[in-house]
Image (cartoon, coloured by chain):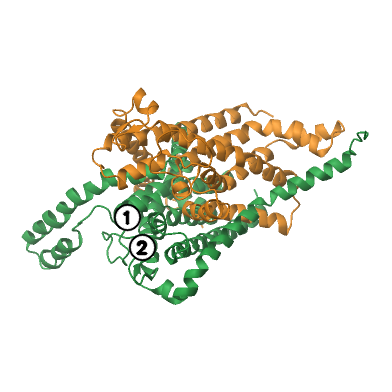
Chain colours: A orange, B green
Amino acid sequence: MIQGEGNKHAPFELVHKRKFNLKEGFFLSLIRTLGFTGAVILIIILLFVALNGVKALSWDFITKPPIESMTKGGILPVIVGTILLTIICMVVIIPIGVTTAIFLAEYSKPGFLLNSVNMSIYTLAGVPSVVFGLFGLSVFVITFNFGMSLLAGSFTLAVMILPYIISTSEEAIKAVPYSFREASLACGTTKWQTIWKVVLPTALPGILTGAILGTAKVAGETAPIMFTAAAFFTPGIPKSVFEPVMALPYHIYVLATAGTHIEQTRPIQYGTALTLIILVLGMNLIGIILRSKQRVKKAW
Amino acid sequence: MRKYIPLKWQTKEKFVEIIISSVGFVSVIVLLLIAFFLFKEAFEVFYRAGFYHVILGTQWYPTSDPPKFGMLPLIAGTLTVTGLTAIIAIPLGLATAIYIAEIAHYKIREFLKPLIEMLASFPSVVLGFFGMVIIAPILSNWLSSLLAERLPELLRNTSLPFISTTLADFCYNKFFISSGLNMFTAALMLTVRAIPVISSIAEDALTAVPRTYREASYALGAGKWETIYKVVVPASVSGLSVAVILGIGTIIGETMIVLMVAGGAAVIPHWIFDPIRPMPSAIAAEMAEAAHGSLHYHALFGVGAILFLITLVLSLISDFISKKYRAIKIGEKV
């Protein structure tokens, strides 16, 4: 039963504008303040890292390898390592993820099997990233004997991002109106032809947006690559996929905690953090803008 | 020469369906593989050191001789830091969600929503770095001297019966922060990590409440806060609890923040300014030095297996709640 203010007052008061209610005002402004806190914290952290990091950023910083035991020089191998890890990860996982999404959206029938697939995706999404790191160490590094390598790290990241890619792709495929499929099937095409020529091209922008947002998540992760791919220092760009690589998040961690010149390398730490933030938030921004544009464009 | 016989389209369709269906099960296989490899590697330590000694042992000295693998300090570290974070992060996260979904102006919402979403994929290593470089020094240099020196002095000078003695001593003893890298700093940074997770799921749950509910409430003369508190929140309480559970799952599994700012002492904490070593940070910090195949290596997999089980249970609970919730929703669709 909702207790309105109105039943205490004479009826004519109801037509007047509501008086200021102390309880209402207090709670609404409390929620308002708390709600803004998250945004304010993010802006503070961003500004802080940006202001400190921008001093370190220069053309040399992003195009030169580190020198003098990483106290000077740039972070070129680090950037390249992160980009390679992300690209290989995405090349491996997008086909698998999209196929699973097609299965879930088009071919699956309700029942135990579908439930178990959905359940496993849901569970995988909640597994901590460090556990994926342990899995990658045990499977790719040791059992498959890849060693600490680019390939092992990419595969570990791929396993980690799988549930995200599946659910965004599934959402994109399910957003294609059913009339599209019916129109195609009415032309005499088969189910697979319809999916391949009609559903997938229509869903492609949505799938790509999911992939871009997934890339942003992958690029910022540290724990899965810590024992599968990341090296403290490599002299240059890796020559094969079986070599360890340096990566931006791990580089920040190593310089900030394990180095012998922690205070001395502060500018490099800020610079690396800023580079990572630009990379991750830039990808995010692209994904979010693409998505909002698709929402506007979809007029069917 | 063999003549090329085109496949019948039915055969082709069947073929495609089989391929897609079999790829579709890859997530199930991956989950089973993760569980299998974790427990395979973890089995050794539980077998050789004894299950109860491992779970309830209070001494984690993996490199001493003989090594001790009591995981209770690590588990206690995770639970306490999660609890402390939850106390701060759940109200903030839910308030953010309510603000975005119910109160905010259209234009502010369009700005805040993507911002919160970006915060969700903010690299946690940068949060850890921020905590280490900024929050920890502020705590140990500034807050500690304020609360453990100035405040007790001030309280003693008041010469009031309870305040000048007990409370002053309490402040003097309890608010002295010897190192900024402790549970409290970790909880603060984990809060930043957990707010977007909680608020984005909670916001979805709030938006799913039909508009007619709110209109009915307003029509009865309820104000905005009354409507939120007595209509919208009760109607979406299962979605909100899913948000809270998934947020807690994120906090438990977060590695880099606790690795960098929690202090890393494997002892059972007694107070919020004690350094701790939660489970993920123990794995991340020690895996590099644990030789493959040693008992230490297996013990770290044991920690990972416990972590996996905890998040598995949380996922199952939240899945159960959200399934139940969906069943109700269809019934009372307006």
Judge the density around disc 2: few (<14), some (14-19), many (≥20) Cα neighbours within 10 Å: many
Of pointers 2 and 1, the one earlier in the residue sequence: 2
Q: Can residue A37 be seen in this view?
A: no
Q: Tags 2 and 1 in contact by the CB under 8 Å rule?
A: yes
Q: Residue B197: horizontal and vertical position, in percent?
A: 47, 48
For the residue pair B143 and B163, the one nearer the viewer reads as B143
Circle 2: residue type: Gly
**Residue A135 horizontal side relative to residue B18, left or right:** left
Q: Which of B196 and A156 is in front in this view?
A: A156
Q: Please tell me which residue is depicted at 72% across the width and 57% down the height of the picture.
A: A113
For the image, the number of numbered tags is 2
Question: Which one is in front, A100 or B19?
Answer: B19
Residue at position x 24%, y 38% in the image: A264
User: To which chain does the residue with label 1 belong?
Assistant: B
Q: Is residue A187 above or below residue B224?
A: above
| Chain ID of residue with mark 2 | B
Q: Mark 1 points at which residue?
A: B262
Three-letter amino acid code at disc 1?
A: Ala
What residue is rendered at 52% in x and 51% in y? A141
Can you give x and y, in whole percent of width and height, for residue B225 in the image? 43, 48
Question: How far apart are the alpha carbons under marks 2 and 1?
Answer: 9 Å
